[in-house]
Amino acid sequence: MEHLTRPWRLYGELAGRATRRELAGFDLTFLAALALAWQAPALAAPWLGALDLRPAAMRGGVLLAALGFVLLFGAAPCVAVHARRLHDAGRSGWWLLLPLAAPLLLLPGTRGANRYGADPRERAGTPARATEPAPLRAA
C-alpha cells in the first residue's frame, strides 16, 4: 500500500526518486478520482431535483466543481511524482515539459544512488541487491 499513499504524502516534493510501481499506483488513483468526479452530476441528481433547481444548469456546475476540485488538489502531486520518476531514470524533471517524454517514465531506474538520491527500491538498512549469489558456507 506504500506505493499508493507515498505520492499523496509527498504532495509537492520534487526532490528524490519514485519507482514505476509508485507512479502506476498514483496514476490509477488519480484516474479513479477523475472518473468519480465525472460521475458527480449523476450522483448529485436526486439532491438537485429535491431543491427544485434547474437540473440541466446545475449538472454543469456540479461537474465543473467536482473536476476542478480533483484537478486542483491532484495537480501538484501529479507533477511531483512524475518528476521523481524521471529522477529515478537519471533524467531531470524538466523533461516533463516535452510532449514526447512519456516513454521516459517507463524506463527502468538506475540501480543504487544517483545524483537525485538513494535508490527507492532499497529499504533503510537493507543492502543493495547483489548481482551474484552469495557463496555457500559450510555449517
Image (tube, rainbow, N blue to C red):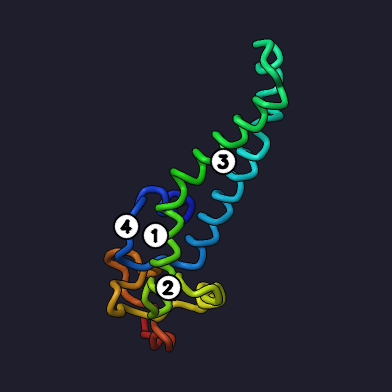
Q: Are marks 4 and 1 in contact (CB under 8 Å)?
A: yes
Q: Residue 13: which numbered mark, if any?
A: 4
Please tell me which of labels 2 and 1 falls first in the chain.
1
> Tag 4: Cα neighbours inside 10 Å, few (<14), some, or many (≥20)?
some
Tag 2: amino acid? Leu
Q: Residue 67: which numbered mark, if any?
A: 3
Residue 34 image point, x, y percent: 60, 45
Query: Nearer the observer, disc 2 or disc 3?
Result: 3
Distance between the alpha carbons at the discs numbered 2 and 4:
13 Å
Tag 4: amino acid? Glu
Q: Is residue 37 left or right of residue 93?
A: right
Query: Nearer the observer, disc 4 or disc 3?
Result: 3
Q: Residue 80: which numbered mark, if any?
A: 1
Q: Is residue 30 left or right of residue 129?
A: right
Please tell me which of labels 4 and 3 falls first in the chain.
4
Residue in the picture at 48% in, 60% down = 22
Q: Are marks 2 and 3 in contact (CB under 8 Å)?
A: no
Q: Residue 86: which numbered mark, if any?
A: 2
Q: Quadrant of residue 114?
A: bottom left
Residue in the picture at 30% in, 78% down = 113
Dot 1 falls on a residue whose secondary structure is helix
Residue 98 image point, x, y percent: 49, 75
Tag 3: amino acid? Leu
